Image (cartoon, rainbow, N blue to C red):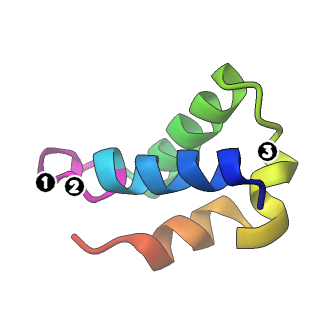
Amino acid sequence: MSDRARKLFDSYVAESLNHPDLTGLSMGSHVFNLSSAASEARIPASEMIEEVGPLSQALLAARTC
């Protein structure tokens, strides 16, 4: 994973995925939100998926709440 994609993934995990106020969001919503953030940052989804695998599985593994 590129450094910029890793930073975006880690930031999303810390600020959204594991935020206590957002625990009710479905995993599909989290995947959509992360994909949208990547698109806005001009980071191809393939760049993120290359290292972490499917985004839903990577987010599930990173979920702590």
Q: Image quadrant for the C terminus? A: bottom left
Position of 12 relative to 53 (above/below): above
* Residue 18 lies within the magenta run: yes
Disc 1 crowd rating (10 Å Cα; few below 14, some 14-19, many 20+) is: few
Q: Is residue 53 visible?
A: no
Q: Looking at this rendering, what residue extends furthest in the bottom direction?
A: 61
Of marks 3 and 2, the one in the foreground: 3
Query: At 22% from the left edge and 46% from the top edge, which residue is drawn?
Result: 22
Locate residue 40, reporting x and y percent: 65, 20
Residue that mark 3 sits on:
45
Query: At 78% from the left edge and 70% from the top edge, which residue is drawn?
Result: 51
Residue that mark 1 sits on:
20
Locate residue 57, reporting x and y percent: 60, 73
Amino acid bearing label 2: Thr
Q: Looking at this rendering, what residue extends furthest in the top direction?
A: 40
Position of 51 relative to 2 (above/below): below
Q: Image quadrant for the N terminus? A: bottom right
The answer to whether 33 appears left or right of 52 in the picture is left
Amino acid bearing label 1: Pro
Of marks 1 and 2, the one in the foreground: 1
Disc 2 crowd rating (10 Å Cα; few below 14, some 14-19, many 20+) is: some
Amino acid bearing label 3: Ala
Q: CA distance from mark 1 to mark 2?
A: 6 Å
Q: Which residues are magenta?
A: 17-25
- Answer with mark 3 or mark 2, whichever residue precedes in sequence: 2
Query: At 13% from the left edge and 45% from the top edge, which residue is drawn?
Result: 21
Relative depth, front residue between 45 and 27: 45
Residue that mark 2 sits on:
23
The answer to whether 40 appears left or right of 33 in the picture is right
The residue tagged with tag 2: helix, strand or loop? loop
The answer to whether 62 appears left or right of 34 in the picture is left
* Residue 26 lies within the magenta run: no
